[in-house]
Amino acid sequence: MKPLAKVSYVTLVALGAFSFAGVASAQTVLQFVGPEQPSAMEPVIAAFEAAHPDIQVEYESVPFNDLNNIIQARLSDGGTTPDIYTADQPRIAALVDRGLLADLSDQADGLGGVMWPAAVEASSIDGQLYAMPISTSSQLLYYNIDLLEAAGIPLPSMDPEGRMTWEALAEAGAAAQAEGAQYGVVLDQINRYYQLQPLMESAGGGSGVSPDDPLVPDLVNDGWLRAMTYYHDLFDSGLGPRGVPVEQTPDLFANGQTAFFVGGPWWLPRMTGTEGLRFGIAPHPYFDGGEVVTPTGAWSWGVNPNSEHLEEAVTFVSFASTDPVGSLETARGFPIPPANMGVFDTYYAEGQEVEGVGDLILHELTETARIRPPTRGYIQFEQILGQAFEDIRNGADPATALEQAQSQLERAWSRL
Amino acid sequence: MFGIRRFRPAGGQAVTAILFLVPALLVLVAFRLWPAALSVAGSFQHNGEWVGLDNYVFLFQSDTAVQSLIVTLIYNVIINPVQIAIAFALALLLVDKIVAPSVWRSLLLIPVGIPLAVSSVVWGIAFRPDDGAINAILMALGFPAQPWLTSPDQALLAIMILVSWVGVGYWAFFLTAGLKDIPSSLLEAARIDGATYWQALRYIVIPLMKRPLAFVLVANTVSNFLLFPPIRILTAGGPSGSTNLIMHEVFLNAFTYDDQGLASAEMVILIAVLLLVVSLQFRFLRDR
């Protein structure tokens, strides 16, 4: 290369580098990790980028089961990305304890009256807000009209006053099974605490965490035993399936094999879209003589405290959570109810798959919803209980399994 | 013969040799030795503080951890010999007792090409007690349905079946290569001398297969000690801890509970056991 050519080449490269740097500094790129499909995120990201042309959001979808492990692995050594991630509400205490969530209390003003109180409570630790509530959840009782009619079982009412008991549900399920249904009763998250907490609470056993100390388990009591004996018998009698993992339970209802399915409203689009499936919706069951309790809690979006774009990341999560435009766009992508009450009615007016479901969920969120216990030992709690539930489902004696889980949990929590 | 010990490079050559070795050595240090050292150091810490042997004491007092170690040992004592025996039998068939051996070889290798995570999900569906394919076949043949992955007595067996479905074909492939290296003149000479098939196998083939068998046994043992995907996907260690192989326990502590000290201590114990087992295997299969 001749000297002159060399100089111009170097100059060109340098100019190129400068112009590239210019573009890079104008456009901040936020990395976002969550369990939703990328299509669910498109509406809110598009709306945000339109309102903030200098910020770009790159979303990465990871499987729900691996979300917490991935966040743990990427953030625990001070990693700067992802800038934003989906925080499972009951795990927020543990994430805060490990220093993985930035304090967002500056954004907390004005959440009162806008968000479902349970969603704010589930995103706060000691009065400080650590993640912006995005969605909330509830559970419904789905029933297969054809299977119930074939067995001569009256269709349950959608009215919360006419709510079925777990005992009546098991009887009706058995009757439907006698007339051809493969399964009588299937639970959506069949071995997860989220799904089963209402059984223990309704039977008077409490959440499983001592009300006096969030690191003392309370699994060995009459309420837990009653609920777990019911759960054990559900599978021992063949009313529900063994060996079917959480991911495959909705198929059993969609395929028309199951009379009753206790599941989230996020399955409504799937079920209404299934040809030949005639189904109805009723309120979540409770134990005879017990309190009515329904599950709740879902996602909040948190910010990595080590993010290099902390300010922009906070701007994004606030936009998605509290901004009237942003929160509606967030809700539009999601099949579960928004945490923002302001957009709740619009959301259900637009996308109500079954007439009356929005009102039923509204009723449950205001009257019967109970969040999971806010303990920083929740991760161990959920894991160890998940194994105990699965063992009981597979036939282990409920009392023994609960005692084992209690002692395992005591040991695990002693490490915190 | 030109042996390594006789190699005495001149000064310039030595520098060149070292320079060529540097990238490999750097990778070895960065990705093997350094993490291993960190892991050992980490096993004496809890939440960043030195705690001496506390993590080890905690593990040996924990029913879950001790049971996990026992399950891992039982699993390995059974699966390694069984897999090698089946793989060896398949390799013998593939070498000379079967029509169109290349077709069979390809069929045996197909499971290897499927990611273990995917085969785990598919086998999980096949093992479903109520509507799984395996029970459907059993019942069609007049046998009762089995609980498989939902029973503490059968879950580990079900995992072994799944893992062997993949592993047996893979290891048979290596053993086939070893069998083909045996000079046919030796076997012909034996036949002329009147040796039966079993005699030839016992006194010629198996002794000559010691090297490939040693490799396959050691590699198989290591992969079985470190087995993880089917446990994570299908059983999460249950029912009642019956499939809680130690790698799953390490994963839980490291990535779910964020208890790096405990995970490191379990890893150190696992590696110590593995080294012991592998050194015994080398001892037994040494060329004499």
Image: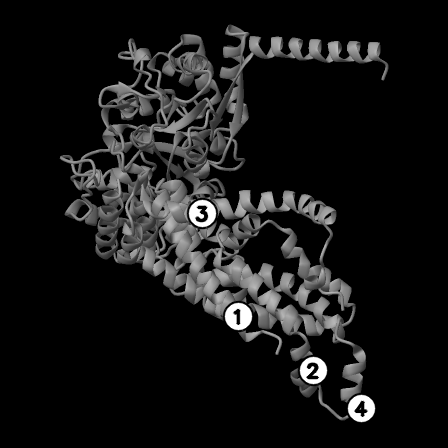
Three-letter amino acid code at disc 4? Ile
**Subunit ID for the residue under disc 1:** B
Q: What residue would you read off at disc 4?
A: B192
Q: Nearer the viewer, mark 3 or mark 4?
A: 3
Q: Nearer the viewer, mark 3 or mark 2?
A: 3
- The residues tagged by marks 3 and 2 sit, at their Cα atoms, a distance apart of 44 Å
Q: Earlier in the sequence, mark 3 or mark 1?
A: 3
Looking at marks 1 and 2 on the same chain, the residue that comes earlier in the sequence is marked by 2
Residue A170 visible in rendering:
yes
Q: CA distance from mark 4 to mark 2?
A: 14 Å
Q: CA distance from mark 3 to mark 4?
A: 58 Å
What residue type is disc 2 on?
Ile
Query: Helix, strand, or loop for circle 4?
Result: helix
How many residues crowd around disc 1 within 10 Å: few (fewer than 14), some, or many (20 or more)? some
Q: Say whether marks 3 and 2 touch (CB < 8 Å).
A: no
Marks 1 and 4, how far apart at CA: 35 Å
In this rendering, would A37 be left or right of B50? right
Tell me the SS state at disc 3. Answer: helix
Q: Which residue is mark 1?
A: B281
